[in-house]
Image: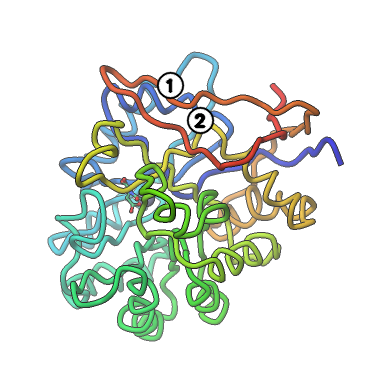
Amino acid sequence: MTSLTIRQPDDWHLHLRDGAMLGAVLPHSAWAARAIIMPNLVPPVVTLADARAYRDRIMASLPAGQAFEPLMTLYLTEATDPDDVQAAAASGLVKAVKLYPAGATTNSQSGVRVIDNVMPVLERMAAIGLPLCVHGEVTDASVDIFDREAVFIERVLEPLTRRLPDLRVIMEHVTTADGVQFVEEAGIGGTITVHHLIINRNHILAGGIRPHYYCLPVAKREMHRLALRRAATSGKAGFFLGTDSAPHPDSAKETACGCAGCFTAPNTLSCLAHVFEEEGALDRLEAFASLNGPAYYGLEPNEAQVTLVKRDQPVSFPTHIDAGDETVTVFDPGFPLHWEVQT
Ligand code: NCD
Ligand code: ZN
């Protein structure tokens, strides 16, 4: 197959940041019609008013001619008011609430320490059908970083889904076979990134430390990467694309204590087509990238279509983009890419 036409994809987990960075990265997500916009700004997007103001800044940064619908989220804190969440959902502007365990990842300091403290919000969300996006890692310092997702399932996610069976939960950026199995068994949603389909932990650590492959949850062993590939290419309704494209200035990545995040927006669809072709599953790319996500969120799939074309020669992508005075490194899959979005 050398050409593939599918409904236009969406991105169910995206970091756009703010200010100059927002302006620099937004055009690179033009392949997506819609995206769930992560609220982990400094300060975070906590209220409906914050979400409305952030949405306005995104729309003001949109290049002329780019159609893009930001699906806003609220950052759940222990002070979040259930009534504000309900009003946010009713406004139609906010499509989900994001749960960060406090300290789990970039800008998660204001997140949740004790899940019981947010139960009134979660109960309200279950009642009104507003989805909860979950960063699924424990922050317990005694738990090995490679085990934090599996332990989170056991300690937090499984009890939560049992306690609130009506809550629509999305386990974000699933990185383990345990996560894949839980998404299926619990009948919840699970997003998968492009980079976790491509790299395992050796890419980060073997033969030198590669900060641009460091993200959270951190990439795991090869067996987990293979489980993610099977899940993404299965066509099963629970699994859909959430890139977690997370730009950071190179100066903040290439340093003694580099921060977490891979910037995959520019080559997402090329990487994805490559992976699905390797798995003999190009016919299931549309389910993963364009159909399962909207279905889980109760939205219609996009009417517009995109065509991916396989070129004989490798397609080139920039190694970096400029963002204000900084540069941001684009994810390097480590192999030539031949699939290109036809424009
Ligand atoms: C994200 C970021 O930089 O905001 N980083 C990451 O490694 N994925 C936060 C997140 O989604 O965990
Ligand atoms: Zn993220």
Residue at point 62%, 42% (across, down): 271
| 42 up-or-down from 343: above or below | below
Taking depth in this image into account, of 136 and 188 the one nearest to the observer is 136
Quarter holding the N terminus?
top right
Q: Nearer the viewer, residue 28 or 228?
A: 228
| Residue 261, position as x, y percentages in the image | 36, 46
Q: What element carries label 1?
A: loop
Instruction: Find disc 1 in the rendering and name its residue.
Output: 62
* Quarter of the figure with residue 41: top left
The residue under label 2 is: 68
Does the image show residue 137?
Answer: yes
The amino acid pointed to by label 2 is Phe
Q: What element carries label 2?
A: loop
Q: Is residue 154 left or right of residue 18?
A: right
Q: Residues within 10 Å of mark 1 (few under 14, many from 20)?
A: some
Q: Pinpoint residue 254: horizontal percent, then vertical percent.
A: 28, 37
**Number of callouts:** 2
Side of 66 where 325 appears, left or right = left
Q: Residue at x 70, y 65 (%)?
A: 234
Colour treatment of the image: rainbow
Which residue lies at the image location 34% right of the left edge and 62% below the top edge?
A: 135
Cβ of disc 1 within 8 Å of ligand 1?
no
Q: Which amino acid does label 1 sit on?
A: Leu
Query: Which of the marked residues, 1 or 2, is nearer the chain's N terminus?
Result: 1
Q: Is residue 93 visible?
A: no
Q: Nearer the viewer, residue 157 or 125?
A: 157
- Taking 86 as reference, is 34 left or right? right
From the top left corner, tell me how far across and down residue 291 is, in percent. Answer: 66, 52
Report the residue at 36% width, 51% height from top: 215
